[in-house]
Image: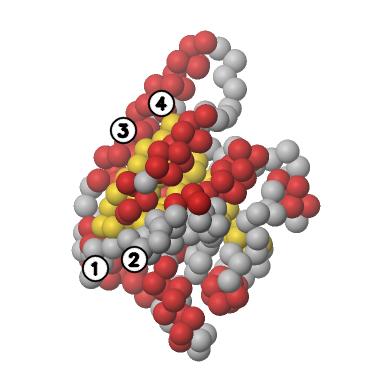
Amino acid sequence: MKSIELFAGIGGISLAAEWAGIETIAFCEREPFPQKVLKKHWPGVPIFDDVCTLNRQVLEESGVIERGGTVDIISGGWPCQPFATVNRKRKGSGDERYLWPEMFRLIDELRPNWVVGENVADFSRSDEHEQVHKDLESIGYQTQPFIMAASTVGAPHRRYRTFIVAYTSNKSEPQTNKAISTKRKERDSWRDLARWYRRKVPGSYWDVYKPGVPGVDDGIPDRVDRSGVLGNAVVPQQIYPIFKAIIDIEGGCRDGSRA
């Protein structure tokens, strides 16, 4: 499976996707320091610097996707400042940094099978959280939110995060029975995803993968920049179960085990 990560930062989401066997074929990240980290850890993967100008045409002309093609997954953690508790002047969707509409625009253009979104825990209590679900459902996606602490996967801090996972089947089915079968597979897939994600990952999992987190030991000396991006970075272990569940679900659907 192939993925495009928006608002990539230092690639925490893509690292988790990589552990699950998913290839990131493009990033979108505007800040220079995170771009350095991405280039070091994912050499050769194109980095676009403006989500507002990224569209199907740009991706096709750059060779990221084929003409008329798409990608399996679009993921991204749009800027959290409009919703973070530490921001006493939270404006939500009125904040110019609220970029979910740009992510949704690209999702609508490409129609990937899966969408994985990430934001701070407080986002789940905002009107915008409900709007994200409405937006995705309006174009045929089933959505499921998850709120999880990093400590659940063995991190030494709690760091709650909101994850939104959305799925659609954009493949046409020639027979009515096939369509019914597809709906059954989708329903079972969501049960599997919820069960997989709520299962506690052993604490040893954190220790096994900790050395591979990009930015921790990347050979780039900009210490001030590093502290900022690490503070905003997604904990890969925290989102990995989602990507592993997606791989398991896709494998099950392909081999017909849920038909």
On the image, the x and y values in percent for residue 190 come to 36, 33
Q: Earlier in the sequence, mark 2 or mark 4?
A: 2
Residue toward you, 24 or 27: 27
Residue toward you, 224 or 12: 224
Q: Earlier in the sequence, mark 2 or mark 1?
A: 2
Q: Earlier in the sequence, mark 3 or mark 4?
A: 4
Within 10 Å of disc 3 (Cα), the crowding (few <14, some 14-19, many 20+) is few
Q: Residue furthest top?
A: 176
Q: Residue furthest bottom?
A: 221
- The CA span between labels 3 and 1 is 28 Å
Residue behind mark 3: 191
Q: Nearer the viewer, mark 4 or mark 1?
A: 1
- The CA span between labels 2 and 1 is 17 Å
Q: Residue visible at 31% across and 33% down? A: 191
109 to the left or right of 252: right
Residue behind mark 1: 157
Residue behind mark 4: 185
- Disc 2 marks a residue whose amino acid type is Val
Q: Nearer the viewer, mark 2 or mark 3?
A: 2
Secondary structure beneath dot 4 equals helix
* Image quadrant where residue 26 sits: bottom right
Q: Residue visible at 29% across and 49% down? A: 147
- Disc 4 marks a residue whose amino acid type is Lys
Residue 86 image label: 2
